[in-house]
C-alpha cells in the first residue's frame, strides 16, 4: 500500500521528492481503529531529551508542527520522558492520553514498546504509532521504521574519505539494537572505503539505560579521549548527548558527524562549523505522513520502512565540507539502492 510523502516534501527544507511504500507484504494492514470525524487530537510522547534535543525528538516535533499547519483544526498534547524514569511511567503516560481521548498517539522511540504492547489492545479504537520499533504489533499500531544502517554506511564512507589520520570514532547513547544498527552500518562504510582505518567505539551507558541520550558531559569526555588518541572524525548517535561530542570536536580542531537531523543547522551556532555532515533520518516526514494518513483514513497498521531508495535516510551538505566527495557518495548511494553494495543491519 502506498504511503505518500504528501505536501510536506514541498514545505519542509530538504524534503525528498519520492514515494514511501508501506510494507504490505510484511504484514501491514488497514487499521481496524474506527476513524473519527472530529479534528485530530494527537498525543505525542517524547523520548529522553524531549523537544529541544536538536536531534531525534526535534525531528518528530518538526513533523507534528508541519501537520498542525496543514491539517485543519489538529490539536496536540506533548509529554516528555524524564531521565531515569521507570518503565511504568511510560505506561501511565500512554494510558492517560488514551483515556483522555487522544487519537492518534505517537510514541517517539523504542523505549515505548512495552507501553504500547500493554495499552493499545485496551483501546482498540485508538490509533498508535511508534518510531524505530518493529517488535510491538497490533491492528491499531503502525511501526515507523528506518534503514539507519544504510545512512550510517554513508557516514562511515565520509569519515574514511575525510580522515587524515586514518583513525575515526563512534559514540552511541547506549548499545541497544536500534543504536547498534548505526554502528554496524558506520563500520561497514568505513571499511568499504578503507579497511585500514582504525575505528574507536564508545557507548555512554548500558543497553537498557536511556540516560546516555541526555548526558552531553559524558559524551564530551568520551569524544575527547578519542580525539586525543588520534581520531579526527567522530560520528555521534546519542540524542541530546551529541552536543558534548560537538564541543569536544571544536576544542580538538577536528570533525564530528551529526545524526537524525541536519545538525549543522540545529546545533549550537558555536559548534556548527565542526559538523562535517549529518545522517538525516526523515522522522519528520514519517510522522507527518502518518498523521496525514490518519486524517484521510488511509492509515495502515504494521511496518512502514523508510530507506535510501525511498528517501527515508540521507546525508546533509550544509557547510560545503563534503562537496568534494559528493560524487563518490552519490555513487555509493546508488550502489546500495540497486543492491550492488549490501549493507547488513547487524
Image (cartoon, rainbow, N blue to C red):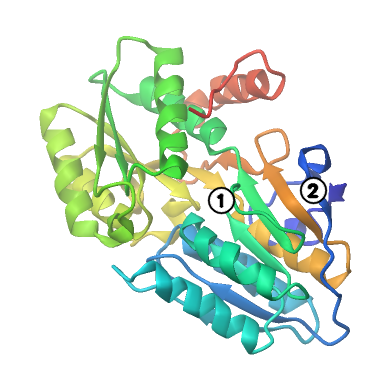
* Residue lying at 12% horizontally and 29% vertically, measured from the top left: 229
Q: Quadrant of residue 296 in the image?
A: bottom right
Secondary structure found at label 1: loop
Q: Earlier in the sequence, mark 2 or mark 1?
A: 2
How many numbered dots are placed on residues in this image?
Answer: 2
* Residue lying at 63% horizontally and 89% vertically, measured from the top left: 100
* Residue lying at 88% horizontally and 84% vertically, measured from the top left: 37
Using the image as rendered, state which of residue 247 and residue 185 is in the foreground: 185
Query: Alpha carbon of mark 2 to alpha carbon of mark 1: how far?
Result: 16 Å
* Residue lying at 63% horizontally and 22% vertically, measured from the top left: 336
Q: In this view, does 254 lie to the left or right of 332?
A: left
Q: Where is residue 62 in the image (x, y as percent from the top left)?
A: 59, 67
Q: Which mark is residue 262?
A: none
Q: Which of marks 2 and 1 is in front?
A: 2
The relative height of residue 159 versus residue 33 in the rendered view (above or below) is above
Q: Quadrant of residue 83 in the image?
A: bottom left
Q: Where is residue 183 in the image (x, y as percent from the top left)?
A: 40, 33
Q: Residues within 10 Å of mark 1 (few under 14, many from 20)?
A: many
Q: In this view, does 213 lie to the left or right of 224?
A: right
- Taking the image as drawn, is residue 255 in sight? yes
Q: Mark 1 points at which residue?
A: 132
Q: Where is residue 245 in the image (x, y as percent from the top left)?
A: 26, 48
Q: Where is residue 327 in the image (x, y as percent from the top left)?
A: 58, 22
Contact? badges 2 and 1 (CB < 8 Å): no
Q: How crowded is mark 2: few (under 14 residues within 10 Å), some or many (20 or more)?
A: many
Q: In this view, does 137 lie to the left or right of 324?
A: right
Secondary structure found at label 2: loop
The relative height of residue 163 versus residue 170 in the rendered view (above or below) is above
- Taking the image as drawn, is residue 77 in sight? no
Q: Name the residue under label 2.
A: 28
Amino acid at each position: 500500500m502506498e504511503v505518500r510523502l504528501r505536501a510536506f516534501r514541498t514545505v519542509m527544507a530538504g524534503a525528498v521528492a519520492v514515494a514511501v511504500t508501506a510494507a504490505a507484504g510484511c504484514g501491514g494492514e488497514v487499521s481496524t481503529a474506527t476513524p473519527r470525524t472530529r479534528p485530530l487530537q494527537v498525543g505525542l510522547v517524547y523520548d529522553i531529551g524531549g523537544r529541544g534535543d536538536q536531534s531525534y525528538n526535534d525531528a518528530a516535533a518538526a513533523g507534528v508542527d508541519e501537520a498542525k499547519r496543514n491539517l485543519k483544526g489538529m490539536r496536540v498534547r506533548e509529554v516528555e520522558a524524564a531521565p531515569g524514569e521507570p518503565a511504568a511511567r511510560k505506561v501511565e503516560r500512554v494510558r492517560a492520553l488514551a483515556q483522555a481521548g487522544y487519537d492518534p498517539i505517537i510514541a517517539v522511540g523504542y523505549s515505548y514498546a512495552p507501553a504500547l504492547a500493554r495499552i493499545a489492545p485496551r483501546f482498540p479504537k485508538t490509533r498508535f504509532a511508534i518510531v524505530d520499533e518493529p517488535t510491538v504489533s497490533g491492528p491499531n499500531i503502525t511501526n515507523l521504521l528506518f534503514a539507519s544502517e544504510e545512512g550510517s554506511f554513508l557516514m562511515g564512507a565520509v569519515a574514511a574519505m575525510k580522515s587524515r589520520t586514518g583513525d575515526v570514532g563512534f559514540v552511541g547513547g547506549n548499545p541497544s539494537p536500534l543504536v547498534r544498527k548505526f554502528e554496524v552500518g558506520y563500520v561497514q562504510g568505513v571499511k568499504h572505503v578503507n579497511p585500514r582505518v582504525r575505528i574507536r567505539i564508545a557507548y555512554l551507558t548500558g543497553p537498557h539505560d536511556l540516560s546516555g541520550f541526555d548526558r552531553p558531559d559524558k559524551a564530551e569526555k568520551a569524544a575527547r579521549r578519542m580525539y586525543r588518541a588520534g581520531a579526527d572524525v567522530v560520528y555521534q548517535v546519542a540524542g541530546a548527548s551529541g552536543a558534548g561530542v560537538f564541543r569536544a570536536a571544536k576544542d580538538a580542531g577536528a570533525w564530528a558527524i551529526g545524526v537524525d537531523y541536519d545538525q549543522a543547522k540545529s546545533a549550537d551556532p558555536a559548534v556548527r562549523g565542526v559538523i562535517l555532515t549529518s545522517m538525516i533520518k526523515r522522522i519528520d516526514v514519517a510522522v507527518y505522513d502518518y498523521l496525514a494518513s490518519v486524517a484521510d483514513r488511509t492509515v495502515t497498521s504494521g511496518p512502514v520502512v523508510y530507506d535510501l531508495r525511498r528517501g527515508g535516510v540521507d546525508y546533509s551538505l550544509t557547510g560545503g565540507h563534503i562537496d568534494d566527495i559528493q560524487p563518490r557518495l552519490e555513487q555509493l548511494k546508488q550502489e546500495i539502492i540497486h543492491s550492488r553494495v549490501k549493507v547488513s543491519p547487524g
